[in-house]
Image (tube, helix red, strand yellow):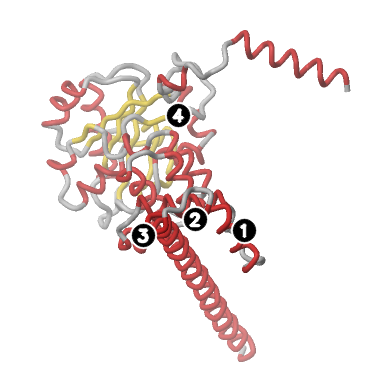
Amino acid sequence: MTQNLIDQDYRQFLADLKQSVYNARYQAASNVNKELILLYHHIGNKILEAQKNQGWGAKVIDRISKDLKAEFPDMKGFSSRNLKYMQRFAKEYRDLQIVQQVAAQLPWFHIATIMDRVDKKENQIFYMRNAAQYAWSRSVLVIQIESNLHQRQGQAVTNFKERLVSPQSDLAQYTLKDPYIFDFLSIGEEAHEREIEKELIRHMEKFILELGSGFAFVGRQYHLEVAGQDFYIDLLFYHLKLRCFVVIELKDKDFKPEYAGKMNFYLSAVDDLVKHETDQPSIGLILCKDKNNILAEYTLRDMNKPIGLAQYRFTQGLPENLKTALPTIEELEAELSKNFKSSGEK
């Protein structure tokens, strides 16, 4: 018995030591990354100053690259292309406080990706903040940029300000989007609610990525019994930051006021039958094929439960300037034919 206690104490002691090492390694890596970002910002500034004061042109960057590589052969990041990114970074971000508090929390290639793909500075900062807060990988970052998250976040029609207390109302509003993009689903525009629902469950990882950070899946067709009758919620989630249940109802048609009445009932039932006393009030999200914002606002105004309303889409609309750059069917067929012939010759 004594030996078991000693072993148990040792295992806990060792676990604590391991956690301390992990924490220290993470902190060290974070500090190294921050110093690297500040170094790159400094190098970019020095290049800008030298070009302004000495009148040097763009070609000097190639020479700087060659000399820095020769001096620091073990260090990566001194290519001409990367030095130009540093120059651009310093030019666009003069405020060192933003660099230290926002940009320095990210890997350098996240920053370069954001500068490449996002035009306006305020939108760049939006993606920097979110990427740092939610620890997005570079691929997730690209997905969020390509789906125009900055235009959709917090845009759902809701009655949260009237039905939730601050700051819960603000956080809940920011949590919802409009529209939601389900371009990972391989179903047609005329798909019915149950078909959409099943496909979303099949692609749960991508679905939760689109919903946003903090959503935990509870169940599909979640059963509720009220007054001896059976009712089924399309999708039930729990939000870890809001500390509340989120009821999601899918509609394959345009929004109708009666959808909100049904959601109001579901939220009352969830609050009574499922919600723990320490949870915040449950919120509802109605996802429709289309909606009229004025009709939605009138409908939600006098609902006594917090409800949000948003559209869903299966594809993200392409900007007009990209549509013309897409290959035609004829061009695609010609390319496929050429590739087929080439592979046959081998």
Q: Between marks 2 and 3, how big is the CA–CA gap?
A: 12 Å
Q: Residue furthest front?
A: 55
Report the side of 29 relative to 152 (left or right). right
Locate residue 26, reporting x and y percent: 51, 69
Look at label 2 and name its amino acid: Trp
Q: Between marks 1 and 4, how big is the CA–CA gap?
A: 47 Å
Q: Residue furthest bottom?
A: 2
Please tell me which of labels 2 and 3 falls first in the chain. Answer: 3
Q: Confirm or deny contact between disc 1 and disc 4 (CB under 8 A).
A: no
Look at label 3 and name its amino acid: Val
Q: Between marks 3 and 1, how big is the CA–CA gap?
A: 27 Å
Q: Between marks 4 and 2, how big is the CA–CA gap?
A: 30 Å
Locate residue 293, reporting x and y percent: 20, 24
Residue receiving disc 4: 182
**The N terminus appears in which quarter of the rendering?**
bottom right
Locate residue 196, reporting x and y percent: 46, 24
Report the side of 331 relative to 240 (left or right). right
Residue receiving disc 3: 99
Q: Between marks 2 and 1, how big is the CA–CA gap?
A: 21 Å
Secondary structure, mark 3, is helix
Look at label 1 and name its amino acid: Lys
Q: Confirm or deny contact between disc 2 and disc 3 (CB under 8 A).
A: no
Locate residue 186, reporting x and y percent: 54, 23
Please tell me which of labels 2 and 1 falls first in the chain. Answer: 1
Residue receiving disc 2: 108
Please rate how many residues cluster around mark 4, counting C-alpha atoms within 10 Å: few if below 14, some from 14 to 19, many from 20: many
Residue receiving disc 1: 66
Please state which of the two labelled residues, at mark 2 or mark 1, is closer to the viewer.
1
Q: What is the quadrant of residue 296 in the picture? A: top left
Please state which of the two labelled residues, at mark 1 or mark 4, is closer to the viewer.
1
